[in-house]
Amino acid sequence: MAMTLRLTEEEQNALRERAAFDGTSMQEAARRAVREYVAKADHRDRVAAAAEVIEQRHADALRRLGE
């Protein structure tokens, strides 16, 4: 799927420099950034869901520890 990504001049220059330093294209650097962004958000959501389950299952113990 094609998409247009509008960057400020500063963002474009930073991306160009970083991609050149890494020996990759600007497109690949941007795609990698998107994959990392999605993976981090997914991980954060899974951790929050797991914490909620633990909090619910052990609410009494957690309350007692807080006393």
Image: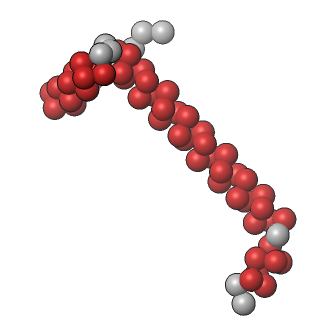
- In the image, is 39 to the left or to the right of 55? left
**Number of on-image labels:** 0
The residue sitting at 48% across, 32% down in the picture is 36
The residue sitting at 76% across, 76% down in the picture is 62
Q: Position of residue 24 (x, y in %)?
A: 32, 15
The residue lying furthest to the top in this view is: 1
Q: Position of residue 56 (x, y in %)?
A: 80, 65
- In the image, is 14 to the left or to the right of 58? left
Look at the image and tell me whether residue 47 can be seen: yes
Scheme of image coloration: secondary structure
- In the image, is 35 to the left or to the right of 51? left
Q: Position of residue 63 (x, y in %)?
A: 76, 81
Q: Answer above or below: position of 25 versus 9.
A: above
Look at the image and tell me whether residue 4 can be seen: no
**Quadrant that contains the C terminus:** bottom right
The residue sitting at 52% across, 33% down in the picture is 38
Q: Answer above or below: position of 43 versus 19.
A: below
Nearer-the-camera pick, 41 or 1: 41
Q: Answer above or below: position of 32 versus 66.
A: above
Q: Position of residue 8 (x, y in %)?
A: 19, 29
The residue sitting at 45% across, 28% down in the picture is 34
The quarter holding residue 66 reads bottom right
The residue lying furthest to the bottom in this view is: 67
The quarter holding residue 64 reads bottom right
